[in-house]
Image (cartoon, helix red, strand yellow):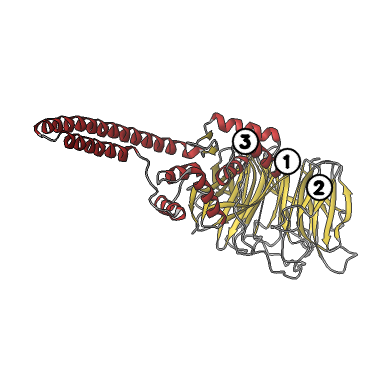
């Protein structure tokens, strides 16, 4: 007889392979955040609907969620395969992400984390990767890292948690990192700097690290996924407690959660062969782990997370990998096992988060930075643009390739009647702008035809007037008087023609009011060149308009919005 072990709740088919996934909590709601090979970060609600996505330059390699600013809504810390490290803020009311931190490093970002290691109310931001560096920012506002620690191999895993070391009177908030060569370190940050408390060598690549109480004694252990087919359970000093041999498939990722309601946390492992392994420990202060159940998919499981309505509700496992599917399953034994009376977990005094400074929105990829520079500045030479992007951390050849691609796609063009400046056009607005330009062209052709018709009518009228006057003058005795009248009427006709052909005078001497009026009527104008063209029609010159737009932008009267709908708009 086959006993049912778990319930499959749903499967979601993602666009590409999944490399990372986490739960984002925002007040009373929970969302799934995931990303991978298609270079996009997605956020999905409880109805399995994608409500927003953000495009990066490289694969999404790691995700961590944490409320960094204390507003009750998690931020997303993420790293990409081309060295971009970002923090994204989710606006629950607009259902939109915005980047509030963007740092570029040299290499893949393979692990990312956020924790208040110094216990000052401002979370440190941590990342590591194949550039063999551990990078730590003091807080969200820091523009440059406070610590850069160098290693002899890749930083492949990092995790923070509360650990009680025998030689210390009080528990600490520690950072544990692992490398490709199997080095494991416990690090503590203090006012004196970065201290390595101990270092161990596990002889094989470290794929994942978790810190949790799996021994059921109220103290946290260190759980390591090792590339030598072992789950290595260590104490707070990095000493061996128990090694679990995985029958097949290297353990790539882990999750430590109570999935059956007995208060003892299970060790959940995702393997390279697609197997999901669940290990349980039903005893107090014990390492008596046994296999609870397992299931298998076709390809590697790359990351996992869990979700529950509250701490006493059924906890569901969410996992994804190379088969492009995200699955949600739940243990069938929830609430059926006896509850273990586990000692209260060790803890640290609570420190309120003190990081509520408002940060401006930033681009999430190189195209976004190009768009920002070209819409807020004037570039007659793209070499200066390349220099500015290089200062941000982008490599010269990557910038050149992107500019070449944008030119080929007609998204980077020279567009100005008199000024030789470069303009960026977002891809999604190409069709709309082309349609608008066609309307403007048709309108100009119509106006030109109308002007030619009026000119012809004036010339014809002038000839008719001249003939009539000549006839009248012949009847008059005073020849000189007749000639004077002829010249006067001719002059009247010339004046009419001059009025038709003369340029329009500015409708208002206040250029600021004209720009504000246009943005009030249009709400959004797609690019600076489009805004300049609209104001030119009011009779002002382009250089004067460009200068005024820059001034209004600096004065926070107008701004360029990168979120949809994109464009220049009034500051609300």
Mark 2 near mark 3, Cβ–Cβ under 8 Å? no
- Could you say which is closer to the camera, residue 332 or residue 511? 511
- Could you say which is closer to the camera, residue 553 or residue 326? 553
* Residue at 72% over, 67% down: 341
Please give the residue where the numbered disc 2 appears in the rendered image.
Answer: 178
> Where the N terminus falls, by quadrant?
top right
Please give the residue where the numbered disc 1 appears in the rendered image.
Answer: 108
Q: Nearer the viewer, mark 2 or mark 3?
A: 3
- Dot 2 crowding, Cα within 10 Å, few <14, some 14–19, many 20+: many
Q: Nearer the viewer, mark 3 or mark 1?
A: 3
Whole-percent x, y for residue 434 in the image: 43, 35
**Sequence-first disc among 3 and 1:** 1
Distance Cα–Cα, label 3 vs label 1: 28 Å
Figure quadrant of residue 452: top left
**Sequence-first disc among 1 and 2:** 1
Count of numbered tags: 3
Q: Secondary structure at mark 3?
A: helix
Q: Secondary structure at mark 2?
A: strand
**Sequence-first disc among 2 and 3:** 2
- Dot 1 crowding, Cα within 10 Å, few <14, some 14–19, many 20+: many
Query: In the image as oriented, which residue stretches furthest toward the bottom?
Result: 349
Q: Is residue 365 visible?
A: yes
């Amino acid at each position: 007889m086959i006993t049912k072990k778990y319930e499959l709740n749903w499967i979601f088919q993602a666009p590409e392979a999944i490399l990372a996934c986490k739960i984002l909590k925002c007040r009373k709601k929970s969302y799934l955040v995931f990303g991978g090979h298609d270079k996009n970060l997605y956020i999905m609600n409880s109805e399995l609907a994608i409500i927003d996505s953000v495009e990066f330059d490289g694969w999404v390699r790691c995700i961590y969620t944490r409320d960094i600013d204390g507003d009750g809504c998690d931020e997303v810390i993420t790293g990409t395969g081309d060295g971009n490290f970002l923090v994204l803020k989710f606006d629950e009311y607009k259902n939109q992400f915005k980047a509030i931190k963007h740092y570029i490093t040299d290499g893949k970002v393979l692990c990312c984390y956020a924790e208040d290691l110094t216990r000052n109310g401002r979370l440190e931001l941590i990342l590591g990767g194949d550039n063999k560096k551990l990078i730590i920012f003091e807080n969200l506002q820091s523009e440059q890292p406070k610590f850069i620690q160098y290693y002899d191999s890749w930083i492949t895993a990092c995790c923070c948690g509360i650990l009680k070391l025998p030689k210390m009177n009080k528990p600490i908030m520690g950072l544990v990192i692992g490398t490709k060569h199997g080095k494991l370190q416990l690090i503590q940050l203090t006012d004196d700097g970065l201290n390595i408390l101990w270092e161990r060598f596990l002889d094989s690549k470290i794929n994942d690290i978790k810190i949790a109480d799996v021994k059921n004694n109220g103290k946290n252990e260190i759980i390591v996924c090792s590339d030598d087919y072992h789950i290595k359970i260590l104490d707070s000093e990095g000493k061996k407690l128990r090694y679990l041999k995985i029958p097949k498939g290297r353990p790539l990722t882990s999750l430590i959660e109570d999935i059956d309601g007995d208060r003892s946390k299970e060790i959940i492992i995702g393997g390279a062969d697609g197997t999901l392994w669940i290990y349980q420990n039903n005893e107090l202060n014990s390492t008596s782990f046994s296999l609870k159940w397992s299931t298998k998919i076709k390809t590697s499981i790359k990351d996992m997370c869990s979700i529950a309505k509250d701490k006493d509700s059924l906890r569901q496992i969410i996992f994804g990998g190379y088969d492009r599917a995200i699955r949600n399953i739940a243990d069938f034994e929830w609430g059926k096992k006896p509850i273990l009376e586990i000692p209260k977990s060790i803890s640290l005094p609570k420190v309120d988060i003190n990081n509520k400074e408002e940060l401006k929105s930033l681009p999430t990829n190189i195209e976004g930075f190009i768009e920002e520079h070209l819409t807020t500045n004037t570039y007659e030479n793209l070499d200066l643009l390349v220099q500015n992007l290089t200062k941000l951390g982008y490599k010269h050849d990557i910038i050149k390739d992107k500019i070449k691609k944008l030119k080929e796609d007609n998204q980077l063009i020279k567009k100005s009647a008199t000024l030789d400046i470069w303009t960026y056009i977002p891809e999604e607005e190409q069709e709309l702008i082309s349609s608008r330009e066609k309307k403007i062209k048709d309108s100009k052709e119509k106006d030109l035809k109308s002007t030619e018709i009026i000119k012809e009518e004036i010339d014809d009228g002038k000839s008719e007037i001249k003939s009539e006057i000549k006839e009248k003058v012949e009847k008059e005795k005073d020849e000189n008087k007749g000639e004077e009248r002829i010249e006067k009427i001719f002059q009247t006709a010339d004046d009419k023609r001059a009025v038709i052909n003369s340029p329009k005078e500015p409708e208002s001497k206040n250029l600021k009011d004209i720009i504000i009026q246009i943005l009030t009527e249009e709400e959004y104008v797609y690019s600076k060149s489009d805004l300049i063209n609209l104001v030119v029609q009011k009779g002002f010159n382009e250089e004067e308009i460009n200068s005024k737009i820059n001034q209004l932008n600096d004065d926070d009267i107008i701004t360029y919005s990168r979120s949809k709908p994109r464009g220049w708009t009034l500051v609300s």
